[in-house]
Image: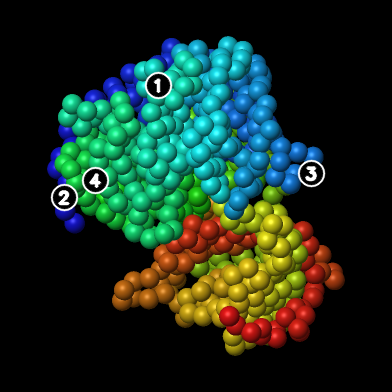
Amino acid sequence: MPVPPLVLSLPRRVAAFLLCSSILCAVPDDWPTWRGPHGDNVSREKGWSAEGAATPLWRAEIGRGYSAPSIARGRLVIDGYFPGASDEGEGEDRVQCLDAVSGEVLWTQRYQALAYANEHRGGTLGTSTIHEDSVYLLARDGVLRAFALEDGALRWSANLVERHAVDPGRYGFASTPYVDGELVIVNASRTIALERASGATRWISEARDANYATVAPIQLGERRGYVVFGGAGLAVLDAASGERLRDYVFRKSPKNVEGATPIVIGTQVFVSSAYDQGAALIDFATDPPRELWRSRAMRTKLAGCTLFEDHFYGFDESMLKCLDLRGEERWRVRGLGQGALAISGGRLLVTTSEGELLLARATPEGFVEDSRRALFDDGVFWTAPVLANGLLYVRASHGGLVCLDHRLASQAPRTTEPAAPTNVAPQLDEPTSAALPTPEELLRRYRAAAAFPEEALPALTWRGKLHIVGLGVEDSAALWSIDTRGRWHARFDLPPGIGGAIDRVFDGERAWEKNPYRGNKLIEGDELSELQRTAGYRDLLDPLPRGVPAITRGEERFRGARCFAVELELAREPRVVRTVYFDATSGLLAGRSAPREATVSFGAWRAAGLEGRALRLPFARTVFDPETGIEQRWTFDAVRIEAPAEEVFEMPVMK
């Protein structure tokens, strides 16, 4: 791998000046736009406490979406989508201005809108920019608006679809307006520069399918430009005219996501994308640009990376990773899901797919978690947390916004710790010795806590709902059925716009998927092995297979819970291990993880109420594929003794 030249601090200060000279805020600790006042997603704020108050300062309902809050002059601006009465894709977008400390709504603007619920529940995408006394926001339908920060009065609007025939595509526009002097720059299929005072178009670039990422300023010699990510790759456009100065082809296959804001380091640019694309560092000082390195170690899907002290931090699909400037991985953490992060005070501020806020050390030496707290019960958490003036704001896609008080004790009173929850599983006696419990002891505790019978479990059918994060499957009717012969059937409904259902079946010898949307197929190889562990009883009944070397590694956190981690050595050459987690308090199975395997977690254990049996079963199951970043969340309402219907085991014609 070629080693890039040393990146000096002076070009970074120049890049920071380029951005700070454009986005001015009255208070140094404000966060007036996407990725903050410096455009790097790093807060320079020092007057905040990592501990924070025990209870949220306030909560607000701000509508569906992924837009981040923008904070300036004591005001918070955020937008969200509110569905209509039928919730069939038509409703309204609301732009709301709240008091940043109290959460009081100061003004609201409403506009008719479509949900754009394609492969997700829909909602707003772009983040507003506060500049001086104005707010600029690009809606996903292509309307750019300017509001007065004081009272929300509309100063001007520009319908870019009507004016320039740009196409919002399947998902809509997601670019955040970038204010540069007297101009506002947005990516809306083309890059468009509008006059900040009137909304008149100053210049428009050639078409690039740049619908999602926000522009980033760059200085190339005497020429100032904007880095644009979209279409086949990266381009540098002249800031004065929109003329293309440089071009770099990044896309290696048709499937990609151009949502990450490029990170500018002097004349070098870091870019990343999901699926088969990965990340690259390119030097634009020359024409054509020079690729310094390229790697699949960082495949960001939506949130992008953050550069801090010469290291990139971000979500590679569903794994949190740290890379150095040479693209070499320093560490990785599994089990957090598709989240997002920001950095302040040498700490990572991370949202997880479970609705948690996690604080950890921003250091390449290794992942060290400092704290974790649950904030939401459901939703998608692709929006990075925002820290401004000691207050931390976290958004959930379903419409919740929470404000956490992390001001220093001298700035705000601390609240007392809340009472411990009462709806937890029955407690088992903790081990009396200081020594760690053996794998055999943990397995016995688990079977006792779950009241598993010595004989085989009966045929069971779970019914409930399935949510597949990012694929538009939300609260779909689902069932999971297993018989005493080891055969199983899993089924879930497809979204209303598609119709039908997907069935996955194992008849004891063969497995297949019956899919009216993509066609039927056999399930074989690694995919079948994974399904046998997750859809069959293996994870539940035999989490520690006999004959596999096992040791208790210690106490670790898994999905926010304190667990005993048991390491299974599946192979020695090369060494392959799987970690199984048992809840340290209840003794119940929490889940398992391993390289190149899905991360599986179990929750909501309770008495199943099956014909007088004392059996306890999990009523929640999460299956998380690190390669695709797809997370399945199964939540069950009921379970009964019922075998799969025999007709489901009749194999259909394969496509």
Instruction: Measuring from the top left, give residue 95's x and y in whole percent.
Output: 62, 26
Viewer-side residue, 600 vs 648: 648
Which tag is nearer the camera, tag 4 or tag 1?
1
Q: Residues within 10 Å of mark 4 (few under 14, many from 20)?
A: many
Give the position of the C terminus as an image quadrant: bottom right
Distance in Å between CA atoms under marks 3 and 4 = 48 Å
Element at badge 1?
Answer: strand
Q: Which mark is residue 3?
A: 2
Which tag is nearer the camera, tag 2 or tag 4?
4
Element at badge 2?
Answer: loop
Q: Counting residues from the N terminus, which is met first, the one under dot 2 or under dot 4? A: 2
Q: Which mark is residue 183?
A: 1
> Looking at the image, which residue sits at the far right?
611
**Amino acid under disc 3:** Ser
Q: Residues within 10 Å of mark 1 (few under 14, many from 20)?
A: many
Instruction: Measuring from the top left, give residue 256's x and y in whole percent.
Output: 42, 54
Viewer-side residue, 336 vs 614: 336
**Amino acid under disc 4:** Ile
Distance in Å between CA atoms under marks 1 and 3 = 40 Å
